[in-house]
Amino acid sequence: MIHLLLTYKYIILIPLAIIEGPIVTILAGFLVTLGVMNPFIIYPIMVVGDAVGDGLIYYVGYTGKKLLSFFKVDDAKLVRAKKYFADNHHKAITMSKLIHGIGFVGLIAAGATHVPYKKYFTTCILISMVQSFVMLAIGILFGHAYITIEKYLNTYAAVVSSIGIIVVAVVVLKKYVFKPKIIL
C-alpha cells in the first residue's frame, strides 16, 4: 500500500477527494509534513475533487426524486425547501457543505429543488476553495505538531530509559559489587 501511495499518490487522491474531500485533505496535509506530497499539487486536486463530488450529489438530487422518499422528504417539505433555497441560497448550501453527514441531504435537496446549477456550482467551488485551504493547513499544522511531539517523546523516553538503567545499575552494584563485609 505504501508503495502504491508513493508511486500513484496524486492519482489516488482524485477519487478520494470526490468521495470525502475534507478528511482526505487533512490526511494529505499530514503527508506534506512527512515530505511525501506537495501542497501546491494537493490543493487544486482537492478543490476539483470536492467540486466534482458536489456536482454528482446535485445530479442525484436533480434526477432522483425517488431517493428523497428514503430521507423522508415529501412534496410539502420539498416546496418549503425550494422556498428556503430561493430565499437563502448561499446560507443553505454553505451550511450543507460544512455540516458533514446530514449536510449531504441539503446538497441533494439543492438538486431536487432545481437550484440553478451555476449558482450552486459557484457557491460550492468558493466554499471548497476556502475549506480545502483550511483543512490542508490543519493537516500541515497537526503534522508539524506530531513531528515535534514525537521528537520530545523520543527524548523523554530516552531520558527515562537512561535514568532507569542508572538506577538498576546502582542497585546491582550496591548489592553485589560493593557488598559490605561484616567482620566479627
Image: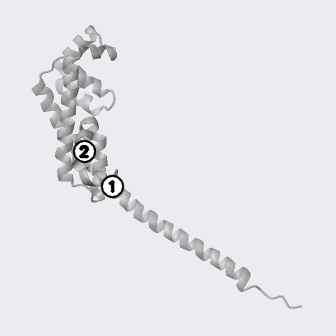
Query: Residue 143, which numbered label?
Result: 1
Q: Do the residues labelled 2 and 1 touch (CB within 8 Å)?
A: no
Tell me if 13 is positioned left or right of 164 in this view.
Answer: left
Q: Which quadrant of the figure has residue 36? A: bottom left
Query: Residue 82, which numbered label?
Result: none
Percent across and percent down for residue 97 are 25, 31
Q: How crowded is mark 1: few (under 14 residues within 10 Å), some or many (20 or more)?
A: many
Percent across and percent down for residue 87 are 17, 19
Q: Residue reaching furthest top?
A: 76
Q: Which residue is drawn at 77% across and 86% down?
A: 180
Q: Which residue is drawn at 22% across and 33% down?
A: 53
- Secondary-structure class at tag 2: helix
Query: Residue 13, which numbered label?
Result: 2
Tell me if 32 is positioned left or right of 55 in this view.
Answer: right
Cα distance, mark 2 to mark 1? 18 Å
Q: How crowded is mark 2: few (under 14 residues within 10 Å), some or many (20 or more)?
A: many
Nearest to the observer: residue 74 or residue 98: 74
Q: Is residue 129 at least partly visible in the picture?
A: no
Q: What amino acid type is highlighted by mark number 2? A: Leu
Percent across and percent down for residue 34 are 30, 59
In the rendered image of this protein, does residue 49 appear above or below residue 82? Answer: below
